[in-house]
Image: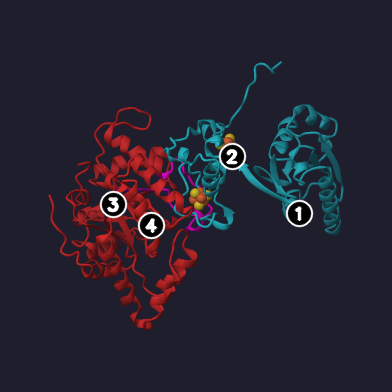
Chain colours: A red, B cyan
Amino acid sequence: MKAGSNLEKMLSAGHFAVTGELGPPQGNNAEEVRHKAGFLKGIVESVNITDNQTAVVRMASWAACKILIDEGLEPNYQMVCRDRNRLALMADILGATALGIKNVLCLSGDHQRFGSHPESKNVYDLDSVQLLAAFKKMRDEKKFLNDKDLDGSPEIFIGAASNPFADPFEFRVTRLAKKIAAGADFVQTQCIYNMDKFRLFMKQAVDRGLHEKCYILAGVTPMKSVGMAKYMAKFVPGMDVPESVVKRLQSVDKKQQAAEGIKMAIEQIEEFKQMDGVAGVHVMAIEWEHRAKEIIEGAGLLPRPVVD
Amino acid sequence: MIVGDSKPLEEILSMIEGRDKVLVLGCRGCVTVCNVGGEKEVGILASALRISRKKAGLPPTVEEMTLERQCDPEYVEELADVAEKYDAIVSIACGVGPQFVAERFRDVAVFPGINTTFIGGALEHGVWAERCQSCGNCLVHNFGGLCPIARCSKSLMNGPCGGSASGNCEISPEVPCVWDQIVQKMSAMGRLQELEQVWPNKNWLTARDGGPRKRVREDLKQ
Ligand code: SF4
Ligand code: SF4
């Protein structure tokens, strides 16, 4: 065991794991975090807490993680390289593990240009791959990046993100392999809509044996409406929403679109359960936390197994 | 070369408001090549200032001068006899020019007439693009000769990020993703394998992060 988190235990026991996601508020309202967390309690192994997601300032991820721990949930602390240099990144992981955070997700972070403070300076002292390596070094060698010993041991289950749908496609599996080589214990993918492309991506990953070196969780975000599908297709960088997805949502009455979106997510999860190399799903029901249960239950994944 | 952009005329007019005798000072270096601060542009800016100030009923005295280089004390010295007679010197060299003039002439007010934008080159006539951030430790040979520090919006050394789409960067469809180009180029050269390694953390000490930089060449010093 690297960190002995619930997520790590579930994956290493061979269970099909489920993670959720929660975006902290644009303010310091702890109650809102607790409220959203309530919907996810008991239905996922752990919950990703986003870090200034889409470059919009929000309650610090580590703080929202602590609120979750206090509520009896397990957080995955997301960290982006955009907002802090290597000193702050290392300091934060020491603080986070001291607070009982056991999972981290290392990301480059969206560029701030479309965020709430586009005029800000960006940092990118390290990139996401280098951040994975930094945390692995701190955990396994108990050393800072400068090779000096650190006091204690930041035991942390290290995660990375992978977007199978960004370009150039032929380099995507290689980049995943780099993240694993750098230190990723688990990987969560970008939300998947183009199943054909994802199958191809997984096949390449399995051919390289990556699924044996790291747990790969497939990303699922239910579509709430035709509007959301069209928006994602057009405006979200690195998102691949095939026309067939939009068509299927259009084929039902407007009032039924949300239910149809959930149905589609369930069908996807059913396929992921069978797919070679997929160790679990990452359900990102963004600002829709209260519908996550329907999806997870619908996919036959409740109750969650208990491991210790 | 160093590439710059003219400041809007209004901005220059308001900077020199209340100053009677003005000198527009050009440079025959980079800014001449990128058509923003050479003798020709000195003439254009000076006459635009004259016309505007005349219209506004202000003293239209605007004189012109262009130095070989403003980043070299030897040439800045050419101003020695004249600098003091101006109430404002508008330098249209890169950011180095106004500073060298200001440092040499204690009592003269110097104003920047251009915005210094980047180190780059001309893609075609009238189009320039950034190529280098002067990080102080060049490593482009590892990336097919293309710079991920200056040209990737996130300076990723292990790109491309998840926002790369159809050859463009996540920040804009107008901005090429250099990491897409790096992958294509390394692939075409049969060297894609080299990108499989995890590039270690960069030492930014040689970059601006290490503080203002200075270089001393003992062999050239007198
Ligand atoms: S690696 Fe550094 S020196 Fe080389 S082109 Fe890029 S920014 Fe300039
Ligand atoms: S899309 Fe390409 S250029 Fe833009 S930040 Fe990502 S890797 Fe860098």
Q: Secondary structure at mark 2?
A: loop
Q: Residue at x 81, y 50 (%)?
A: B45
Q: Residue at x 35, y 28 (%)?
A: A147
In this rendering, the label closer to the viewer, 2 or 4:
4
The image quarter in which residue A279 lies: bottom left
In this rendering, the label closer to the viewer, 1 or 4:
4
Q: Which residue is mark 3?
A: A76
Q: Is residue A228 visible?
A: no
Label disc, if present, on residue A93 of the rendered structure:
none
Q: Secondary structure at mark 3?
A: strand
Q: Residue at x 50, y 57 (%)?
A: B165
Give the chain letter at badge 2: B
Crowd class of label 4 (few under 14; some 14 to 19; many from 20; radius 10 Å):
few
Q: Which residue is mark 1?
A: B9
The image quarter in which residue B140 lies: top right
Mark 3 or mark 4, which is nearer the start of the sequence?
Answer: 3
Label 1 to label 3, Cα distance in Å? 53 Å
Give the chain letter at badge 3: A
Q: Which residue is mark 2?
A: B133
In this rendering, the label closer to the viewer, 2 or 1:
2
Give the chain letter at badge 1: B
Crowd class of label 1 (few under 14; some 14 to 19; many from 20; radius 10 Å):
some
Q: Is residue A164 visible?
A: yes
Please, what is the three-letter code of the amino acid marked with disc 1?
Leu
